[in-house]
């Protein structure tokens, strides 16, 4: 693991003092150091494309080189602004890209990371972006950083620094707090208890998928009604909407996260033009990117309920913060006649230790498809 103080000292000496991006577990050492030591110069973005745009604006306003950090799974979000805004044939914007390399070939990883790991380098090649692969050799890092910064300045082009597992990571911190009484697991169990037994659940990337999976096991319940959105962060609600439109007789429940919902918030506008009274969108809002290190999101700072109302959802007109409030909200919205929404405020941290989510994705989705098409 590289020494984060040395990393930032080198970047500062090269004139790189502005950071933006989406936190990643492979970069949590870097992300946590930036959060602690550069709070005014570290912008946690809604998604990776958003970060590229912020970085471009920073360069336009200061002529200073920015750094954008992300997991490689977010490269899809950044491709459009990289090729149609940043590219040398458009506005020619220099920036460093620090990319956590999940699914690196030969290293082993979960299925949702394998293809992205395989195409990480080819995607950079296709966009004509030069890159270097980092190791835990600090001298090599300093040499590469000099070369990368000089390249960006000379050619006004991006340069990528690829961080394999362990190079930029550190041990995850215990980020549990007591700001709100419910844990995510407690909230999910209440929701399970107050939904029809045949309700379809779509759980977002990260903790919600794992907790739903292991709650089903603990309760000795079938998993065939559950879609576990282990990748494609921000799209669990869209998958659920597609199901809800075709199965109006079934309740379809989204177990979303605040960071995931913000990543593709435009999806919430769809209910303004669709009649889906069986669709219930719940955001389990802990104000954090918990699964990658607990860095803060804007979840507690924005009013999801007002946003949802403006998009056409029926709501309780305020967030819910306790068990009884959640039970009352589920009852009130059950038969409201339109798509409904609840912002459930929960505290950070897990109620217990969860093992890795190891299951057959194909078997799980085939079982759900069979269930939905009986």
Image (tube, rainbow, N blue to C red):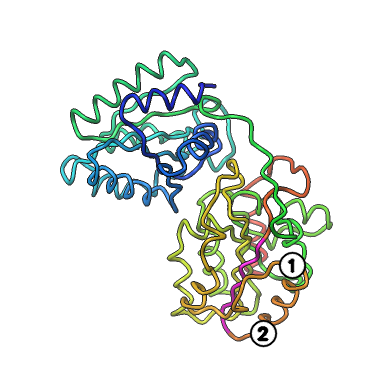
Please identify the quadrant where the N terminus is shown: top right
Between tags 2 and 1, which lies in front?
Answer: 1
The residue that mark 1 highlights is: 322
Residue 247 is one of the magenta-drawn residues:
no
Observer-nearest of 141 and 340? 141
Out of 17 and 123, give the one closest to the viewer. Answer: 17
Q: Secondary structure at mark 2?
A: loop
N-terminal-most mark, 2 or 1:
1
In the depicted structure, whether residue 284 falls above or below residue 250:
above
Q: Magenta stretch: dominant SS? A: strand
Task: State which region is magenta.
Answer: 338-345
- Residue 371 coordinates in the image, percent (x, y): 67, 65
Q: Position of residue 229 (x, y in %)?
A: 58, 54
The crowding category of the residue bearing disc 1, from other C-alpha atoms within 10 Å (few below 14, some 14 to 19, many at least 20), is some
- Can you identify the residue that label 2 sits on? 335
Left or right? Give the position of 97 relative to 340: left
> Is 277 on the left-hand or right-hand side of 83?
right
Q: Could you tell me which residue is drawn at 43 percent across and 44 percent down? A: 40
Asked if disc 2 and disc 1 are in contact, CB closer than 8 Å, the reply is no
């Amino acid at each position: 693991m590289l020494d984060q103080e040395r990393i930032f000292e080198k970047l500062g000496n090269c004139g790189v003092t502005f950071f933006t991006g989406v936190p990643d577990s492979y970069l949590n050492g870097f992300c946590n150091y930036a959060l602690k030591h550069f709070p005014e110069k570290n912008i946690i973005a809604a998604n990776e494309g958003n970060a590229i745009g912020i970085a471009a604006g920073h360069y336009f306003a200061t002529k200073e080189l920015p750094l954008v950090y992300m997991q490689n799974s977010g490269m899809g979000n950044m491709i459009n602004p990289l090729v149609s805004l940043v590219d040398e044939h458009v506005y020619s914007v220099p920036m460093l890209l620090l990319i956590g390399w999940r699914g690196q070939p030969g290293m082993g990883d979960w299925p949702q990371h394998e293809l992205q790991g395989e195409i990480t380098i080819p995607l950079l090649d296709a966009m004509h972006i030069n890159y270097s692969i980092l190791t835990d050799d600090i001298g090599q890092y300093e040499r590469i950083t000099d070369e990368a910064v000089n390249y960006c300045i000379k050619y006004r082009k991006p340069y990528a620094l690829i961080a394999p597992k362990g190079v930029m990571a550190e041990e995850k911190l215990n980020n549990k707090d007591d700001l709100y009484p419910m844990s995510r697991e407690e909230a999910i169990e209440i929701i399970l208890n107050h939904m029809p037994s045949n309700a379809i659940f779509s759980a977002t990337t990260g903790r919600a998928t794992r907790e739903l999976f292991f709650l089903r096991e603990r309760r000795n319940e079938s998993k065939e009604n559950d879609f576990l959105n282990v990748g494609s962060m921000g799209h669990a609600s869209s998958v659920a909407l597609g199901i809800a439109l075709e199965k109006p007789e079934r309740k379809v429940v989204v177990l979303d996260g605040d960071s995931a919902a913000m990543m593709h918030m435009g999806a919430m506008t769809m209910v303004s033009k669709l009649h889906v009274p069986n669709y219930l969108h719940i955001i389990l809002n802990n104000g954090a990117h918990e699964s990658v290190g607990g860095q803060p999101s804007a979840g507690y700072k924005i009013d999801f309920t007002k946003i949802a109302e403006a998009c056409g959802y029926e709501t309780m007109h305020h967030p819910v913060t306790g068990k009884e409030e959640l039970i009352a909200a589920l009852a009130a919205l059950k038969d409201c006649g339109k798509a409904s929404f609840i912002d459930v405020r929960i505290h950070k941290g897990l109620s217990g230790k969860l093992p890795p989510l190891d299951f057959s994705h194909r078997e799980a989705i085939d079982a759900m498809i069979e269930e939905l098409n009986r």
